[in-house]
Structures are given as C-alpha cells and as structure tokens.
Image (cartoon, rainbow, N blue to C red):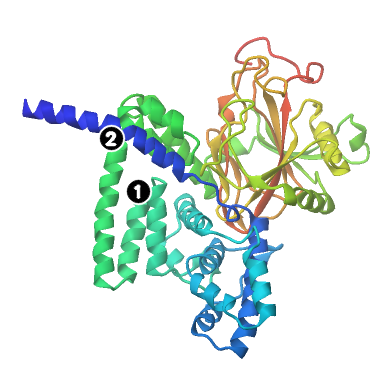
Amino acid sequence: MKFVAETCILRSILSLLLPLLVVLLENHYVEADVYNSASQLASVLRLEKRLVELAQELHSDEPNEELNRFLADSHPIQTFGGSIVSPLDAYHMLRRLTSDFEPVRTALLAARQPDIEGNVTEVLSSPLFPNTTDLNESAFALVRLQDIYDLSTSDLQRGRIRGHRSPWTLSGDDCARLSQQSLSHMEFELAEVWNKAAQQLIHEQQRRVELERKLNSIRATRELVLQLARRQPDQFISKFAGSGIPLGFLGRVVEDADPTDSVAMQDIERRYKRLCRGEALLSPAVTSRFHCAYKRSSDPFFRLRPLKTELLWPDPLIVRFYDVTSPRQRGRLSRLAGPRLVTSKVTGRPGESGRSTQGRVGKMAFLPRGSDPLVGQFHRLVEAFTGLSSETAEDLQVVNYGVGGHYEPHVDFYGSYEIGDFSYPRDRLATFLFYLNSVGAGGATVFPLLGVAAPPVPGSALFWFNLRRSGLADSRTVHASCPVLLGAKSIANFWLHESGQEFRHRCGTSEDE
C-alpha cells in the first residue's frame, strides 16, 4: 500500500510539473540579436575595434587598470570575405563586450575628454551591440559544433578547431557557461563533460563544491525531464519537435509509446551527424551510377552554353547545377538582403508567422518579385534551369548563417492543407537552393535518409522535388543544413509550388509514382 501511495504521489507531481517544464523550455528560446548572423557579427567586430581604438587613446592620456586589461586581452581576429572565421574568436569577442565589459564601460564613460565620451556613447548605443543572450547562445553554438563534428573538449579549451588556432583559450568560467547552456538545451552528456572541464580549471574550493553540486543536479535533471516527458510524450513532441532539442533525446522520450518512431528519430540523428562529418554512407557501387554531364536545353538561355549538372540521387531527383550565378550577382544579392535580415523562424503550417528556435539558427530576408531587377534575374534562372514556372513561387529567401548556424533535419513540404489555408497555391513542389559564398568548413546540405551530402560550392545550386508525381509528400527528402564550423554561409531559397506547373510537370497515375 505504501508503494502504491508513493507512486500516486509521484504521478501527481509529474503531471503538475510537466506544464511548468513546457513553459520553462518555451521561454528559453528567446531571440538574440547578432550572434546568428555572420554579416552582423562582422559589424560587431568593427564596433569592438573602434572601442579598442578609443581605449588606447584614453589609456595613453589617463592610464587605467581596467583599460589596460581590456587592451591586453585584445587580439587580431582572422576574417575571410569580411566574416569571422572561427566560432571561438566570435565567442570571445562577444564575451569581451558583454560579461567582461562593465568595468571597461565605466572607465570609458568616465573619460574627462568629451570627444572620447561621445564616441563611446555612439558605439554603445548601436542596435548591433551584443547582449548576454548573444554570449550564451554563442556558447551553445560551440557545444553544437562539438556534438555534430565530434570535436574534442581539450582542443576547444586550447582554442583549436580543425587546424585553426584562436588567440584565446577557454577559462573555467567559460567551461561552466558551456555546461549551463548545454543543460538548458537538454544536451545532458555534454553538460557533464563541460562541468568536469570547469572543475579542472577552477581551483577555488567553494567554486569546485558548487560545480560538484551542479554536476549532481545535471544528472538528476536529466532523469526528471525524461520522466516528465514520457508521462505525456505526444504533448512533449508536439511542443518541441523542431525546436532544437536533440532528436536522440526525443527518440528516448517516445521509445515506450512508439518504438518505431524512436528508432527512426535516433537513426536520422546518427546519419545526419555522420554526413556532416564527411563520412560516406553510400557504397562505391551506388555512387558509380551517378555522374556529371553537360545537358542541352530548349530554353534560349542555354543556346550558347550547356548546363553543367551533377546527379546526386535519381529518385527523388536531387541534382546540382554549376556556374548558375556570377560573383557579381551573388555579391549584389547579399548586399540587397543585408538590411532586411531578421532572425530565421520555422513554421509547421502554411500561413503561420513562425517562431524562432534552436532548430534553425541564422538570419533571413525575403525579397519579393519586383523589389529589384536582380530578383527578376534569379526568377529567370530558376525557370531556365528547371523548366518550371516561378509565377506561383514564394518570395526569394536569402539566409545568412553566423556562429554555428544550422537548420536541423526537416522537410520543405507542408504535406496536407485545405484550400484557403495560405496565400501560396497548393504545396511546395520543389526547392531550388543557390549557394552564394565559400565556407571554411561545414555547412553542407545533407539528406540523412538517402545518404546524400552536398558541400556548399559558390555559384552552384541544388534542386530537388519535395512531392511525388502523385502530389503526395515525399518524406525521403528530409534534409538539413549542417552547422557552419569555420567561416560563414549564405544561401538563397526558391520554393516552387504545384499550381502553374500543369503543362510543365507531368502528374503521376498512382500514389507511389
């Protein structure tokens, strides 16, 4: 009887705590302003350089211990194409301007030189000046990169990523921050790893005791969250699928209620990570059937030159086109989108405004047809390369990925809808994805179920069908944008809809076609 009573009490507590857990997790995903955009981080770097110049000028006239410490911790940050190369450098820059900055701010604003004070005020009032959320989210971006690319904790501590060396190393406080952000995003194993790393670097006894207690708390939280989620798995999945919570953890949540879905989720996560790491999932016997070729087209656009194509998968068709855009076109498009960039969002239904989540980290801008002649050129390119109409396509979407920017496994189709649900006609038939720049490392587009990976190649474009010829959604087209490991990534998306393709794309006569 005592056991039954205790069980009933536990169930009551769990049922009461689940709504609280939902609220806490939903509130966690708040928007940061700059960390998720490479172009805006470049602007922050310019702000930081300006502050260093002002600090040097003031320190030469009015020596100050805090300014001296700020200047001593200032190191050149490597950039490529205007973007910060290493996410470790971006993290340290954000830390210098947020958690470490208050005494420096005080010293700068206390200057007895009006010109310096005015310039400092101007820099600090910039809408792109980072906040603590940017710092915390950039910390978790490092954790995400570690998880996806199997980076060693010791290398990250020493400032090393794939041969690139940062002038900074991670302190005990940095490791503690990475542990806390891992816990907040349900990366429990990595939360333990970074907690132990912090304990090795922090020698103050009281702090070490606090970290040990935190380690026990991490383990207890993992089991509690799992119990809470398993009590109402459908509610948990509907709330947090696509929100950045690891697919492996979601698979554990449903393993009792739906073992098949559990295996599928965990399998997608494993294949996704392996493809991002550059591992080959397809045998040479399979890939030998794919090929590159010059294709002729009846479109006048290709009268003087054939299409350079690479078949990546035959069914569903996935093909890469080369030399689609010129450097001038790509540069102009990025500049055109720059002022319009907002935090990327995801939506589960047509017509929804969307929500920002850790499942999709970046900035996006929509460029309507007619907003600039360049946008019309991209519409014309899509029609020439695919033979489909862009009249019913969605607005051209430009995406800019910053520190650890990514988009976890997802599909582009909506799957089911009712007429009148949204302004675009019917479902997304196909996707045309332009690559706009070179990426130092990472950033591939991968299809986990098919074993296909397409690294970003500037000037090329990826094309695939999201629907079968029958009009039914093709779930094999689950795809993801791997996190950017070094450098930055910019793409442009075109979603072509079913309506308007009646005389351009043959329909199927069976559901499986």
Task: Pinpoint residue 218: horizontal percent, then vertical percent.
Answer: 29, 50
Q: Amino acid at mark 2?
A: Gln
Question: Is any part of residue 420 visible from this angle?
Answer: yes
Under circle 2, the secondary element is helix
Please provide percent x and percent y for residue 442: 58, 52
Count of numbered circles on the image = 2
Q: Which mark is residue 171?
A: none
**Quadrant in which the N terminus appears:** top left
Q: Nearer the viewer, mark 1 or mark 2?
A: 2
> 479 or 249: which is nearer to us?
249
- As drawn, the residue found furthest toward the top would be 509
Screen quadrant of the C terminus: top right
Q: Which residue lies under the disc numbered 1?
A: 188
Relative to 157, say whether 134 is above or below: above
In the rendered image of this protein, does residue 301 appear above or below residue 186?
A: above
* Cβ–Cβ under 8 Å for marks 1 and 2: no
Q: Pointer 2: what residue?
A: 227
Residue 23 location, x and y as percent?
A: 40, 37
Q: Quadrant of residue 302?
A: top right
- Determine whether the residue tagged by mark 1 lies in a helix, strand or loop: helix
Relative placement, left or right, of 221 versus 163 is left
Image location of residue 99, percent across then percent down: 47, 66
Residue drawn at x 55%, y 61% is: 87
Q: In this view of the protein, which residue sits in the foreground, 157 or 36?
A: 36
Mark with earlier residue (1, 2): 1
Left or right of 140: which side holds 341? Answer: right
- Please, what is the three-letter code of the amino acid marked with disc 1? Phe
